[in-house]
Structure formats: C-alpha cells, structure tokens
Image: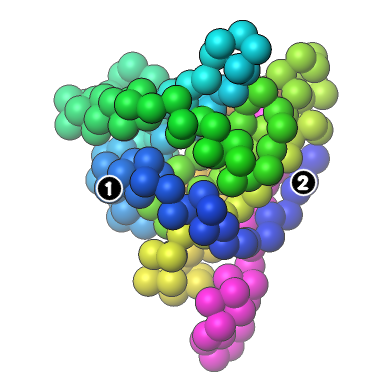
Amino acid sequence: MIKHLTPAFLSELTDQHWINEVCRQLGDATVPGVGLIGVDIGHVDLPEADLVVSKPCVGFVSCGPRIEATCMNCQPAERVKYDRIEAILSSSFAHSRMTHWALCDKNPQVNTLVFREFTLAYSYDFNLPKPERAASIRPRLILHGSANRLDPRTLSACIQTCLNSFTQAHDDMRALQLVAPAPSALASIFGAAPAGL
C-alpha cells in the first residue's frame, strides 16, 4: 500500500514548546553518523481512564549511511539525549492534550515522529489485526520552519530515508510505503523553486 504525503505547515503544533525542546536534542538527519536524529513519541489522551501522557517510544539513530530504530541499544551520548527528551515530555500532561488539539485528532493515541526538519504525525487503529493496521494509518507530514535551510532535493531524500526507517521498524507497517513529497512540491511550499525542478 502506497501513501503519497503532502507537505504542510502547522504552527499550532510546531510552535509548541515541547517540540522545539525535543528538536534541540536531535542531530541533523542529512549528516551520516551523528547519533540520535529522531524520536517517535506516543501521545495518549484518555481522561476517563485518568491517563494523559506523552512518552518517547523509539529513537532513530544515524549509523553511517543508514538509520536504525532503537529502544535500548543506544550509545551513552544518544541515551542522554533520549533521557532528556523523556524528561521534557514527562514534565506535563498538557503536551499530549495540546498535541491532540493541534492535530484535531480524536483518537486516544496519536504519535509524532519528530526529526529536526519535519514531523510525521500519525494515528491508526491499534485494535485491528496487523495486516489491516497499515491500511488504517492517517499520516500527516508537517514541515518545521528550519526545513527551508535545505535544498528541496536534499530535504526530499532525507524525508524518504527517515520514512523508510520508520516503516521498517514497525512490524505492522511493513506493508506500507510512505512516499516523501517531490523536490518540486517542497520548493513550491517554500515559494522558491530552484531551476530545473
């Protein structure tokens, strides 16, 4: 199953304090081997069960030319950054509630896969059997203001590499192919298409 992503800006999400603090802990995904470059964060909002929490689920680490998902097998410097992110998120239950509000998502859990230049916000029906979960995903690609520092070709390739590592890391998402926006779509959203696109 293929889903082509359309880039968007969503200041209601990207202006939130927690996401900016998380981004400060992340390395540049376009530079090989820089350690922790992304984190998948689950935001659960179940007030009737007295459960409102935001918590990192998986870290994404740049290992040379590839990206690996990891929960526990981190180098010490990566673990320090992951622990800082966990502390940022655990400081308030409002992070989860504000994230749900910003995304207008009524699902009990919504996830934000945060990299320095973009966030993939997604939710899916966890109650479905694994083969059907991928079909229920609702992904949204949200660009950060800093994304315009990259050439659209570089940004598109970077997003695609990160998306590939995400789907490969989730057993129930391997049937899914998330396609990054073309460089021309990214250039147009920033309003400055380079020659040749």
Residue 7 point in image, percent of width and height:
62, 61
Q: Which residue is mark 2?
A: 2
Q: Residue at x 53, y 77 (%)?
A: 190
**Horizontal arrangement in the rendering, residue 64 relative to residue 109 (left or right):** left
- Residue 99 point in image, percent of width and height: 54, 39
Residue sitting at the far bottom? 195
Most distant residue in the top direction: 49
Q: Residue at x 51, y 30 (%)?
A: 96
User: Is 194 a magenta residue?
Assistant: yes
When the figure is inspected, residue 25 is found, relative to residue 81, above or below; the finding is below
31 to the left or right of 3:
left
**Is residue 153 at all visible to an observer of this figure?**
yes
Which residue corresponds to mark 1? Answer: 24
Span highlighted in magenta in the image: 173-197
**Mark closest to the chain's N terminus, 1 or 2:** 2
SS state under label 2: strand
Q: Residues within 10 Å of mark 2 (few under 14, many from 20)?
A: few
The amino acid marked with disc number 2 is: Ile
Colour convention:
rainbow
Residue 36, x across and y down, in percent = 31, 38
Residue at the location (54% across, 90% down)? 195
In the picture, residue 172 is in which quadrant?
Answer: top right
- Residue type for callout 1: Arg
Q: Which mark identifies residue 194? A: none
The relative height of residue 65 versus residue 122 in the rendered view (above or below) is below
Q: Secondary structure at mark 1?
A: helix
Quarter of the image with the N terminus in it: top right
